[in-house]
Image: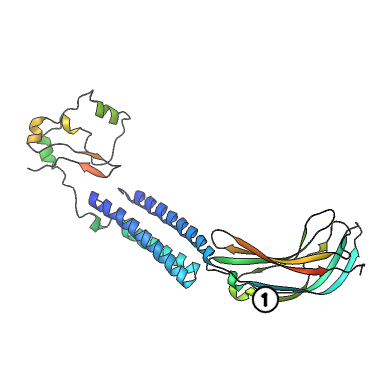
C-alpha cells in the first residue's frame, strides 16, 4: 500500500469496527438477544478484515514516484559526514530500516546546488507515517 | 499499516477491545432492569424430627415452593440459581443457615414455577436445638449474567416452628 492507502485503511478499519460494534449492541439490546449482538459483530469483524487487511488496488491510487535508476546514477548520493549528531543518533544501532530503500540523510546535509536542481534524497519515519521528501522533478 | 500482518494485528486488537467494551456496557445495562419477583413457601408436613447417633437433630419437611422470577431475567442473563435456606438462631450460633433445596432456571419461561417436594438436602443442626425451634424460610436467587456482574436477592418468609418433641 502507499501512504494514502495506509491512512485510508486505518480510517476504514476504525470506522467500520466502531460502527459494527454500536450497531450490533443496539440491535441486540432492542431484540433482547445477546446472541444476535455477537453474530452481527462477528460478521462486522470479518467484513472489516476483508476490506482493510488485504492489499487491494484502491489502496494504491497514490503511488510514489521512484527515481529512475539511470537518473540516480547521474546524481550520486552526497557523502554523509561522519560526526553529524543526528545521523549518529539514528544510526547508532546500525539497524536497516525497510521503508523506502533510501538512506538516512538530513536535508541540510545535501549540497546547495543539488537543492537548486530539485533533487535530493528522502527521509521518512515509518512510525509517524509521514514522508519528508524532496521530489524529483526533472 | 505497512504490511498485511501489521494490519491484521491492529484489526484483531481493536476488535477484541471493542468487544470487551460492549460486554461492559451490556453488564451495565442490567442495572436498568427493576425486577418484581414474588415467592411463596409453605411447609406442608413435618415428616420426622429425630436425633442422629452423633447427637445432632435432623428434620425432614415436605414443602411447596412457588415463585415467579420472570422479571429478574434480562437479555444478558444466562441462568438464575435459586435456593431455599432455613435460618434460625441458637445459643451457640447467631445465625444458622441450611440450604434445603436448589434449582437452576435456564430461561425466562421456566422462571414461574411451583415445586412440591421434600427437602433436597438434609436439615441437620449443630446440636440438638431443633425441638420447638422457630425458623425462617428464605428463598435466595442469583441472577447469573452472560457477561459482567451477578445480582442476587432474596425474600424471607417467617413464622415457621418445629414440633416440641421428636416425631
The residue shown at (56%, 58%) is B149
Which corner quadrant holds the C terminus of chain A?
Answer: top left
The residue shown at (71%, 74%) is B40
Q: Label 1, on which residue?
A: B113
The residue shown at (50%, 63%) is B29
Residue B69 at what x, y percent from top left?
A: 63, 72
Residue B86 at what x, y percent from top left?
A: 77, 64
Instruction: From the viewer's perspective, tell me whether residue B8 is left or right of residue B139.
Output: left
Q: Chain of mark 1?
A: B
**Label 1 crowding class (10 Å Cα cut-off): few <14, some 14-19, many 20+?**
some
The residue nearer to you, when weighing B69 against A76, is: B69
Instruction: From the viewer's perspective, tell me whether residue A104 is left or right of residue A68.
Output: right
Colour treatment of the image: rainbow
Mark 1 secondary-structure assignment: strand
Q: Quick check: can you spot residue B89?
A: yes
Quadrant housing residue A90? top left
The residue nearer to you, when weighing A70 against B136, is: B136
The residue nearer to you, when weighing B35 against A74, is: B35
Amino acid at each position: 500500500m502507499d501512504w494514502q492507502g495506509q491512512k485510508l485503511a486505518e480510517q476504514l478499519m476504525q470506522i467500520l469496527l466502531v460502527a459494527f460494534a454500536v450497531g450490533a449492541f443496539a440491535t441486540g439490546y432492542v431484540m433482547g438477544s445477546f446472541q444476535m449482538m455477537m453474530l452481527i459483530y462477528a460478521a462486522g469483524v470479518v467484513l472489516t478484515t476483508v476490506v482493510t487487511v488485504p492489499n487491494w488496488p484502491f489502496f494504491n491510487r497514490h503511488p510514489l514516484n521512484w527515481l529512475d535508476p539511470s537518473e540516480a546514477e547521474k546524481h550520486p548520493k552526497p557523502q554523509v559526514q561522519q560526526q553529524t549528531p543526528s545521523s549518529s543518533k539514528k544510526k547508532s544501532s546500525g539497524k536497516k530500516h525497510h521503508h523506502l530503500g533510501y538512506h538516512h540523510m538530513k536535508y541540510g546535509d545535501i549540497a546547495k546546488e543539488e537543492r537548486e536542481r530539485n533533487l535530493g534524497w528522502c527521509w521518512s519515519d515509518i512510525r509517524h507515517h509521514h514522508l519528508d521528501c524532496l521530489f524529483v522533478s526533472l | 499499516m505497512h504490511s498485511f500482518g501489521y494490519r491484521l494485528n491492529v484489526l484483531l486488537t481493536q476488535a477484541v477491545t471493542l468487544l470487551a467494551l460492549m460486554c461492559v456496557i451490556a453488564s451495565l445495562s442490567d442495572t436498568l432492569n427493576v425486577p418484581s419477583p414474588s415467592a411463596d413457601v409453605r411447609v406442608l408436613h413435618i415428616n420426622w424430627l429425630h436425633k442422629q447417633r452423633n447427637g445432632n437433630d435432623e428434620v425432614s419437611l415436605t414443602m411447596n415452593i412457588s415463585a415467579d422470577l420472570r422479571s429478574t431475567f434480562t437479555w444478558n442473563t444466562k441462568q438464575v440459581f435459586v435456593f431455599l435456606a432455613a435460618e434460625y438462631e441458637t445459643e451457640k450460633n447467631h445465625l444458622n443457615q441450611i440450604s434445603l433445596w436448589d434449582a437452576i432456571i435456564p430461561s425466562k419461561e421456566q422462571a414461574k414455577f411451583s415445586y412440591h417436594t421434600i427437602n433436597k438436602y438434609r436439615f441437620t443442626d449443630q446440636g440438638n436445638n431443633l425441638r420447638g425451634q422457630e425458623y425462617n424460610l428464605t428463598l435466595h436467587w442469583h441472577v447469573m449474567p452472560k457477561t459482567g456482574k451477578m445480582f442476587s436477592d432474596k425474600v424471607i418468609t417467617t413464622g415457621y416452628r418445629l414440633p416440641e418433641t421428636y416425631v
